[in-house]
C-alpha cells in the first residue's frame, strides 16, 4: 500500500492545538481505553501470584509455561495460545524488509529510539509517572539496565526468524506483556497509584508507546535525512503492528496501515501529551548515555544528544525536559548529512545487503555479550516517588 501522507507532512511535528479528534477516534473513545488494561495477562499474573510466589522476574514466563504444561483449559494455556496466535494479517514475508531496516540503519535507529522515542515519551505525564515509580528509567542507577533490555528487543526483532513464535524477539515481547501485568497489579496493591490517574499501562498508553517505536520513529528517521521507500515504511509498520498484537493491544488500536497510525497517534498525542507539566527525568537518560560515548568529550556528546532530542521532538513537546535551544546548532546539519550519505550507500548495488550484514553481525555480537553477562531480567525495581524526586533534585510533582 502506498503512503498517501506527503513526506513533508510526515516530517512536520504538529502543534497540539492544531490536532483535531474524530478522524480515528473521538476524545471519549480514547478516554474509555484508559480504563482497560490487558485482561488475559492480568488474569495470568493474578492466578500466578495466588498459587505460586514469583521468585524472580524470569520466573513469570517460566512458571506460566510449567503450569500450562500440567494440562487442562487454564488461564496459563489461554495466555500462551493467544501470544502464539498469528493473525491473518501478520505476513512475516512482508515484515522482512522492516526487520532488515532496523539493522540497515542501526545507528540512526538507535539515536531515534533513544532521543525521539524513549526520552520523547516523557511528554506523556501519566506514563512517565509509572516509569518513575517502578524504576523503569526513573532512577539513574536503573537507566542502563532498561536501555539494554530495550536494545535487546530491537536487536532481536531485526534478525530473521526471531519475531515468529519461538523466536527470541517474540519471547521478549511475551515477557514484557507479563511484566506489564505484574506492574498493574503491583501498582494497585501498593496504594501509590490513585484511581483518578486511570489504569496504569492501559490500552491507550500501550498504543502510544507502540507508535513511539513505530510511526514516530519513522518521522525521526526522515527528519535525520534517511530516505525511506513506501515499502520500507509499510513493512516497518507491520513489524510493530505484530509486536503490538503479542503485547496485548486490542485489534481496534492496531492500525491496518501507516497513514492510519499517524492519524491515531496524533489524536493520542493531543489527548495525553502534557510536556510542560512533566519533570525533566529524561535528561538523566541522555546524561548517562553521553558519559559512555567513546572518543568524544562528555560535554560534546551531551550537547549533541540534547539538541538532537529537541530537534526530533520539537520545541513545544520538549518543553518539560528543560533543554535550552541552540539555534543553528551544527550537529543537526552533520546528522542530516550522515543520514543522506547512509541512504546513498544503501541505494548502490549491494549496498542494502552490505549494511544489513554489518548491522546484523553487530547486533548478534551484542546480544551474545548481554546473554553471557545475564543482564536481561525485564523485572520491576520499585521506588518511592519521593526517592525518585530526590535523585533528580526535584520538588514534589503531582500527577
Image (cartoon, rainbow, N blue to C red):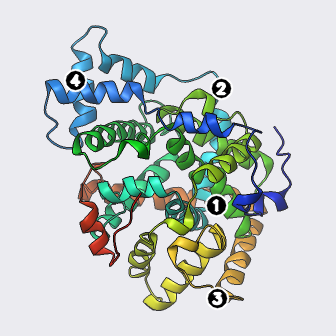
Identified at 56% across, 65% down, the residue is 275
Which residue position holds label 2? 89
| Above/below status of 33 relative to 369 | above
Which residue position holds label 4? 66
Residue 388 in sight from this viewpoint: yes
Q: Distance between the residues labelled 2 and 3?
A: 45 Å
* Residue 136 falls left or right of residue 198: left
Q: Earlier in the sequence, mark 3 or mark 1?
A: 3
Q: Earlier in the sequence, mark 4 or mark 2?
A: 4
Which residue position holds label 1? 354
Identified at 73% across, 59% down, the residue is 17
- Percent position (x, y) of residue 45? 28, 30
Of residue 186 and residue 245, the one placed in the foreground of this image is 186
Which residue position holds label 3? 326
Of residue 202 and residue 82, the one placed in the foreground of this image is 202
Q: Quadrant of the C terminus?
A: bottom left
| Above/below status of 230 relative to 319 | above
Amino acid at each position: 500500500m502506498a503512503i498517501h501522507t506527503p513526506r513533508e507532512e510526515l516530517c512536520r511535528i504538529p502543534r497540539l492545538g492544531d490536532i483535531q479528534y474524530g478522524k480515528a477516534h473521538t476524545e471519549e473513545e480514547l478516554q474509555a481505553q484508559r480504563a482497560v488494561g490487558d485482561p488475559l495477562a492480568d488474569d495470568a499474573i493474578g492466578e500466578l501470584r495466588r498459587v505460586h510466589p514469583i521468585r524472580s522476574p524470569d520466573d513469570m514466563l517460566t512458571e506460566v509455561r510449567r503450569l500450562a504444561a500440567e494440562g487442562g483449559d487454564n488461564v496459563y494455556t489461554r495466555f500462551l495460545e493467544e501470544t502464539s496466535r498469528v493473525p491473518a494479517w501478520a505476513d512475516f514475508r512482508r515484515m522482512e524488509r522492516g526487520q532488515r531496516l532496523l539493522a540497515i540503519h542501526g545507528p540512526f535507529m538507535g539515536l531515534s529510539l533513544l532521543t525521539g522515542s524513549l526520552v520523547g515519551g516523557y511528554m506523556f505525564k501519566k506514563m512517565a509517572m509509572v516509569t518513575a515509580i517502578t524504576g523503569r528509567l526513573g532512577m539513574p542507577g536503573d537507566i542502563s539496565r532498561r536501555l539494554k533490555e530495550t536494545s535487546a528487543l530491537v536487536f532481536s526483532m531485526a534478525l530473521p526468524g526471531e519475531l515468529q513464535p519461538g523466536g527470541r524477539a517474540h519471547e521478549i515481547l511475551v515477557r514484557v506483556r507479563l511484566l506489564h501485568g505484574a506492574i498493574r497489579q503491583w501498582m494497585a496493591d501498593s496504594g501509590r497509584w490513585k484511581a483518578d490517574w486511570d489504569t496504569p499501562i492501559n490500552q491507550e498508553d500501550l498504543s502510544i508507546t507502540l507508535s513511539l517505536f513505530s510511526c514516530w520513529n519513522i518521522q525521526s528517521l526522515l527528519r535525520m535525512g534517511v530516505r525511506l521507500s513506501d515499502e520500507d515504511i509499510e513493512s516497518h509498520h507491520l513489524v510493530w503492528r505484530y509486536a503490538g498484537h503479542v503485547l496485548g493491544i486490542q485489534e481496534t488500536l492496531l492500525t491496518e496501515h501507516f497513514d492510519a497510525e499517524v492519524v491515531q497517534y496524533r489524536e493520542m498525542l493531543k489527548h495525553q501529551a502534557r510536556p510542560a507539566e512533566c519533570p525533566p527525568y529524561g535528561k538523566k537518560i541522555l546524561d548517562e548515555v553521553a558519559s559512555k560515548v567513546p572518543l568524544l568529550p562528555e560535554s560534546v556528546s551531551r550537547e549533541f544528544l540534547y539538541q538532537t532530542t529537541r530537534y526530533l521532538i520539537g520545541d513545544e513537546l520538549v518543553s518539560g525536559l528543560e533543554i535550552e535551544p541552540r539555534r543553528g546548532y551544527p550537529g543537526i546539519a552533520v546528522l542530516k548529512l550522515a543520514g543522506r550519505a547512509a541512504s546513498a550507500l544503501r541505494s548502490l548495488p549491494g549496498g542494502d545487503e552490505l549494511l544489513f550484514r554489518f548491522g546484523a553481525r553487530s547486533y548478534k555480537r551484542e546480544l551474545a555479550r548481554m546473554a553471557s553477562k545475564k543482564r536481561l531480567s525485564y523485572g520491576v525495581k520499585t521506588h518511592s516517588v519521593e526517592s525518585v524526586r530526590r535523585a533528580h533534585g526535584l520538588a514534589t510533582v503531582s500527577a
